[in-house]
Amino acid sequence: MSVTTDFDFADRVRAINASAIRQALKNAGPTTISFAGGLPDPALFDVEGLAHASRLALDDRLAFQYSQTEGVPRLREQLAALLAQRGARVDTDGLIVTTGAMQGIHLIAQILLNPGDSVAVERPTFLTALQTFNLHEARVLEVSGDRFGMLPEALESVLRKQRVKLVYVVPNFNRRGDAVRAPPAAA
């Protein structure tokens, strides 16, 4: 879909194509599970858990108030404590709560990428991440992978040939064979 307008959009915006995911979701019916859109089976939603968490959050009227850009301090403190239980040392000031993966990817691209910078991505990868890197005028370099993700030797080959500013991987799930990555073996 294209829109004709006399408005003077930025050049990078004019180059944006329609979202393939949005189109796939428009074409999906109620009985369709769209792997293109990354839609989980609704039966897997923890409705009771989400309702309970929502009630707890809504008991605090400050939940409706604007807060710090990095996220509500109490939530960031709880996230830091959870990560500490899992062995990560994270200072609350080092956490930013986003509204989803795309906001996080966009922020990283906005902070790190200049036009022409190279981003290495595993092939295949998250389509909307590719759109974000293209919006920031980065050169996308595809790196081969297997059912567990990016092949280290393939990445090493790319890094020998190109200056890469960012490497983007999907850290825990890969659609090639629906493999879920195991944690690294203990040394």
Image (cartoon, rainbow, N blue to C red):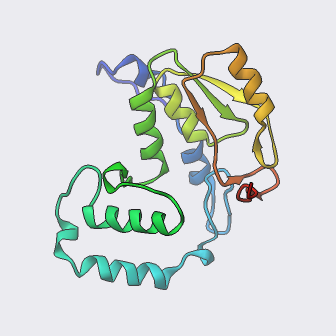
Q: Which of 26 and 33 is in front in this view?
A: 33
Up-down relation of residue 25 to residue 109 (above or below): below
Mark count: 0
Up-down relation of residue 166 to residue 6 (above or below): below
Instruction: Point out residue 174 in the picture as x, y percentages from the top left corner.
Output: 72, 51
Residue displayed at 60% across by 32% down: 167
Instruction: Point out residue 152 in the picture as x, y percentages from the top left corner.
Output: 76, 35
- In this rendering, would 111 be left or right of 169? left
- In this rendering, would 183 be left or right of 115? right
Outermost residue toward the front? 187
Q: Which of 179 and 88 is in front in this view?
A: 88
Residue displayed at 21% across by 77% down: 60
Residue displayed at 42% across by 45% down: 103
Residue displayed at 32% across by 83% down: 55
Q: Quadrant for residue 10, please give it.
A: top left
- In this rendering, would 106 be left or right of 167? left
For the C terminus, give its image quadrant.
Answer: bottom right
Instruction: Point out residue 18 in the picture as x, y percentages from the top left corner.
Output: 52, 35
Up-down relation of residue 42 to residue 33 (above or below): below
Q: Quadrant for residue 6, please give it.
A: top left
Instruction: Point out residue 37 in the picture as x, y percentages from the top left corner.
Output: 61, 52
